[in-house]
Amino acid sequence: MLQSIDSTIRDLFKHYAQHGFLPESFPLTRLSNPYYEPWETLASELPTLIQTQQIRTKVDELPICSTSHLKSEPEWRRAYVIMGYLTHSYIWGGDIPKDRLPPSIAKPFLEISAHLELPACATYAGLTLWNFKPTHPEADITDPDNIQVQTSFTGAKDEEWFMVISVAVEAQGSKLISIMRDAMRAVATNDRELLTALLYSFADGLNTLAIVLRKMYIHNDPAFFYHQLRPLLAGSKNMAHAGLPRGVYYDTGDAVEKPENWLQLSGGSNAQSSLIQTLDIFLGITHSATDGKKASGPAFIHEMRNYMPGPHRRFLEDLTAGSTVRSFILSSGEYSSERHAYNAAVSELKNFRDTHIQMVTRYIVMTSRKSAPVQESEKVNLATASSQGTEVGQSHTLAGTGGTDLMPFLKQTRDTVRDAKC
């Protein structure tokens, strides 16, 4: 039985213990086939096209390219990155949102997304996991100073820093995955001393993740993030208040409109990070059913798994079925060393969540209460919609880019972690 458990753990962690959820090799920087040059050209010019509000005209002029020339997985991923950026730029890159995507991006994007088992929108995978490059081939990418983005909405350092911090967290987090693997082996062999040491190492690793996350403040200005970047990350789900009551229609060029092509999709969100969910699963922390708006329906945090690459999603499902650490701890003595180590890990995960909430408070909650720049005040998007009703004595709901009520969701997930102590 122990050999069977150990074999399952080994298979689960074969790839992820080495690379985490980042690709095995650095993402492709460009589609080399000249056929896709129109895509790459627009992607490289996005900051200027958005600023001058030419992006929609340029996308409308794009030819409808076939996906048949995409051969390798890195090519499919690069195409997904480009289509995600073009899609969100088209929807949100004007004074008011556009609720119809032309066939030039809708048709190939749906095909690319189906291949990668992802929705046709800008997801965490497309924005960060597959959209970075090291400053040099041997760079330590746990340091955000050693990372650059490939495609950008604005071309600003603030946006790049926001993305590369996530990449650095993912790279640092890969070290935790190997600890998880060894801890599950320790449970399988009833090695309590080793499990205790590994859980303390896991707690130290979580503390390091929080340190990396707090580097966000160095190069990312809250006003820039709130008014310039965040509206472009927004999805089309629960965005009626921001001008998309029906979502977005993905026009594939059919003579008759297809009702199923009206899609409501969440935007890019850190809740789509497989690493963040892996931390909870390893510790046996289960989040209650809430989509951030009401305590019913599928949990938002579980819904976000649909926005992860298929292999990542299946890893989480297998890990959920195979993780035995919490049940082992619950069966141990009340004052056992392994229980103290487990509680230390839970405390550090709670602190990591607190760091995120503090960041959201600074970048979103507090910034929403300030006057918008004059050039942005007349627009309709996530920033202007979320800033309405912020006068003294009024309350308002701050929606996340994923479409959820932001602070209640984050606080509930944080409190669930806090309450997981044994």
Image (tube, rainbow, N blue to C red):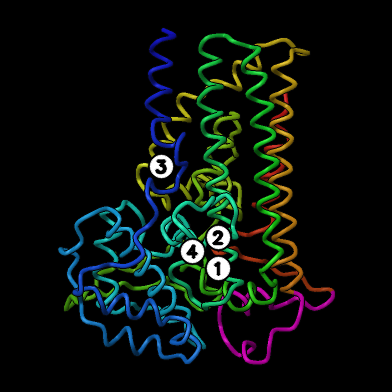
Give the residue at x 72% y 51%. Answer: 355
Residue range highlighted in magenta: 369-392
Q: Is residue 160 left or right of residue 120?
A: right
Give the residue at x 38% y 45%. Answer: 24
Say which label, 1 or 4, has the lower sequence index: 1
For label 1, the residue is 160
- Badge 1 vs badge 3, beta-carbon distance below 8 Å: no
For label 3, the residue is 313
Say which label, 3 or 2, has the lower sequence index: 2
Give the residue at x 48% y 67%. Answer: 235
Report how far apart the C-alphas of labels 2 and 4 lie in the structure.
18 Å
For label 2, the residue is 164
**Which residue is at the front of the view, 27 or 95?**
27
Q: Which mark is residue 267?
A: 4
- Under mark 2, the amino acid is Val
Nearer to us of marks 1 and 3 is 1
Report how far apart the C-alphas of labels 2 and 1 lie in the structure.
6 Å
Which corner quadrant of the image does residue 349 belong to? top right
- Badge 1 vs badge 4, beta-carbon distance below 8 Å: no
Q: Secondary structure at mark 1?
A: helix
- Badge 2 vs badge 4, beta-carbon distance below 8 Å: no
- Under mark 3, the amino acid is Arg
- Find the residue positioned furthest to the right: 392
Report how far apart the C-alphas of labels 3 and 4 lie in the structure.
17 Å
**Which residue is at the front of the view, 123 or 128?**
128
Give the residue at x 57% y 76%. Answer: 156
Tell me if residue 145 comes above or below residue 252 in the rendering: above
Tell me if residue 309 comes above or below residue 185 in the rendering: below
Residue 121 position in % (x across, y down): 40, 64
Q: Secondary structure at mark 4?
A: loop
- Badge 2 vs badge 1, beta-carbon distance below 8 Å: yes
